[in-house]
Image (cartoon, rainbow, N blue to C red):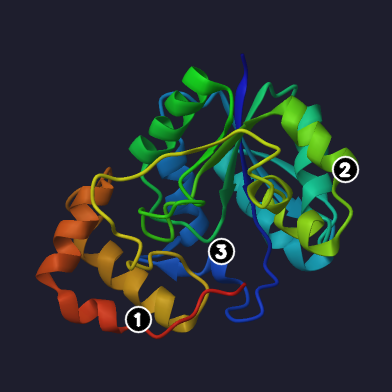
Amino acid sequence: MKIVAIIQARMGSTRLPGKVLRQVLGKPLLAYQLERVRLAKHIDEIIIATTTQPTDDPIITFCQKEDVLFSRGSEQDVLSRYYDTAIQANADVIVRLTSDCPLIDPAVIDKVIETYTLSNHYVSNVVRRTYPRGMDVEVFSIELLKQINEEATSKKDREHVTTFVREQPDRFKIKDVVHRSDYSNYRLTVDTAEDLMLIEKILEKIYPVSPAFTLEDIISLLQKHQDWLKINAHIEQKR
């Protein structure tokens, strides 16, 4: 069973253009994420799936420098980009990650994968949300991805890849991975300048001391600096 992590990434963010390659401590955010995904125990291969747009050429340059596989596909039809990438990689299982999660905890990735191997369902920590935004992981089979790619027709489902499954719980077997505590009010994703400001504070404080930091380390840090949470508390997640 070949487990492939596919990280979707592009430069064209409407709220924070070029966010995936914004630098903290002289290092691109995507490099932090890649470093952390590589620490996950159950992933056999990592591919960064970007678009064919010339504006995303810097992501290709990044991939070549970091010696990580990449693919290019449709900018808007992210579902086809995922499916084509998974087929090219001969993936049996897909771990879906997005490039706005530079603090992703490899232990969280492994937990979702382990839950999948026991159930063979669509497994994620994003449907019943208890993990912070920025710890998002989805795991599903190539067979399910093929089915979604063949049946999903709406612009929303083509863009967001798994909404077709998540919005039909009566049809698909969906399993949630939940944290023992509810940290869903924590926002550790990067979509705005305020998000980036919080991520910078966290990385500058924690990374030089413990580069393999955990989600629990982040939570502990934020509980000591609760004023930091106000930086992006007002940001609403794009629907």
Mark 2 near mark 1, Cβ–Cβ under 8 Å?
Answer: no
Q: Provide residue 213's location: percent of width, then percent of height.
A: 25, 47
Quadrant of the drawing holding the C terminus = bottom right
Which disc, if any, is residue 63?
none
Residue at 82% over, 34% down: 147
Mark 1 near mark 3, Cβ–Cβ under 8 Å?
Answer: no
Q: Earlier in the sequence, mark 1 or mark 3?
A: 3
- In this view, the mark in front (2 or 1): 2
Which residue carries the number 1 mark? Answer: 233
Q: Amino acid at mark 3?
A: Val
Which disc, if any, is residue 151?
2
* Mark pair 1, 3: CA separation: 21 Å
Q: Earlier in the sequence, mark 3 or mark 2?
A: 3
Residue at 45% over, 51% down: 128
Identify the secondary structure beneath mark 2: helix
Q: Provide residue 63's location: percent of width, then percent of height.
A: 63, 46
Identify the secondary structure beneath mark 3: helix
Of residues 133 and 165, the one nearer the viewer is 165
Which residue carries the number 3 mark? Answer: 20
Q: Earlier in the sequence, mark 2 or mark 1?
A: 2
